[in-house]
Image (spheres, helix red, strand yellow):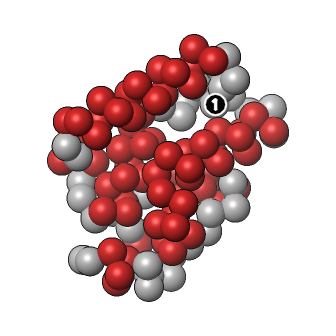
Amino acid sequence: MPKRQLSQLDSLDQLRNIEPVCQADLKAAGISTPSQLIQLGPEAAFLKMLQYRRSQGTSAKCCNAAYLYALYGAIHDVDWRDIPEAQKKRFKKLTAELRQSGQFG
């Protein structure tokens, strides 16, 4: 499904890879539609989720590269296991840097 059509969907649960827990995290962080997720992109949406969790005193340890895979896959309509290896490496590097920063531990 082209990105143009994905942005016209009404609900996050209509996107590939967005399971109930991920959907709840997105909605809690103020991302409630596919078009919002697409506009933000996976990295910004991920950071917004982490910042929300931190503001609520909730652990962000469960938010890892797999969340980024799911978000990327949802935006590009691909299964998270089929994301290009270069992209996976980028996401792993980002999550490692975030953990090392101590902000989201």
Query: Residue 30 vs residue 24: left or right?
Result: right
Q: Which residue is mark 1?
A: 60
**In this orientation, does residue 37 appear?**
yes
Q: Could you say where residue 78 lies in the image, as x and y percent from the top left?
A: 24, 59
Q: Residue 100 or 71: which is nearer the viewer?
A: 100
Rendered view: 68 above or below 105: below
Quarter of the image for residue 91 reads top left
Query: Residue 28 vs residue 89: left or right?
Result: right
**In this orientation, does residue 20 appear?**
no
Quarter of the image for residue 52 reads top right
Rendered view: 56 above or below 14: above
Most extreme residue toward the right, as rendered?
56
Q: Could you say where residue 49 lies in the image, as x and y percent from the top left?
A: 63, 46
Quadrant where the C terminus lies? Answer: top right
Query: Residue 28 vs residue 4: left or right?
Result: right
Rendered view: 28 above or below 85: below
Hey, what amino acid is under mark 1?
Ala
Q: Residue 92 or 60: which is nearer the viewer?
A: 92
Q: Residue at x 37, y 63 (%)?
A: 75
Query: Residue 92 vs residue 103: left or right?
Result: left
Quadrant where the N terminus lies? Answer: bottom left
Q: How many marks?
A: 1
Q: Could you say where residue 14 lies in the image, as x and y percent from the top left?
A: 40, 72
Q: Residue at x 38, y 67 (%)?
A: 15
Quarter of the image for residue 89 reads top left
Q: Residue 31 or 23: which is nearer the viewer?
A: 31
- Local crowd at mark 1 within 10 Å, few (<14), some, or many (≥20)? some
Q: Could you say where residue 35 lies in the image, as x and y percent from the top left?
A: 51, 74
Rendered view: 51 above or below 79: above
Where disc 1 sits, the SS reads: loop
